[in-house]
Image (cartoon, rainbow, N blue to C red):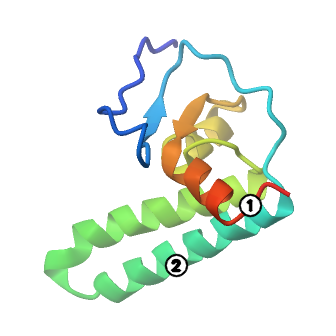
Amino acid sequence: MKLDADVCDLGFSEESGTCAIDTKVPPSPSAPLTRRQRVARLLVGTGFHSAGLIVGGRRTLRPLAIVAHWFGASHLVAATAAYRGCPELGAIPSLVLRRPLATICGPWEAIDRRFALED
């Protein structure tokens, strides 16, 4: 099954960027995540899971907890698989499809540059 989707970053890519998926773009030939980048995704994934546990106890906030757990799980998968791209869009689908799914993640690119995580 092939999706035909265009990149949609809502024009924010100049500032902080957004996560976007474009199946017309081949997977980036860039190297997998470095050890420091993987640790950063691991910490963020753990933080999202913790936030999901904190807000999940209240019935009215359970939808928010589900989103937090999805973000947490996708970041943990990205850390484990050294997935370069937007974790919440492509890490788990790449695992399920058994092939890399091309995504663009402006926020993680900015964080990697800001904290010099690229080694």
Given residues 22 and 94, the one toward you in this image is 22
Q: Residues within 10 Å of mark 1 (few under 14, many from 20)?
A: many
The quadrant in which the C terminus is found is bottom right
Position of residue 4 measured from the top left corner of the image (x, y, whole percent): 43, 11
Image location (x, y in percent) of residue 29: 80, 26
Which residue is at a point 42% across and 23% down the rendered structure image? 7
First-in-chain label (2 vs 1): 1
Residue 117, image x, y percentages: 75, 61
Q: Where residue 50 sits: x, y (%)?
A: 47, 83
Residue located 45% across and 34% down the image? 20
In this rendering, which labeled residue sits more in front, label 2 or label 1?
1
Helix, strand or loop for disc 1: helix
- The residue under label 2 is 47
The vertical placement of 26 against 119, above or below, is: above
- The answer to whether 59 is drawn above or below residue 9 in the figure is below
Amino acid type of the residue that numbered disc 1 sits on in the rendered structure? Gln
Residue named by callout 1: 37
Determine whether 118 is above or below 3 in the image: below
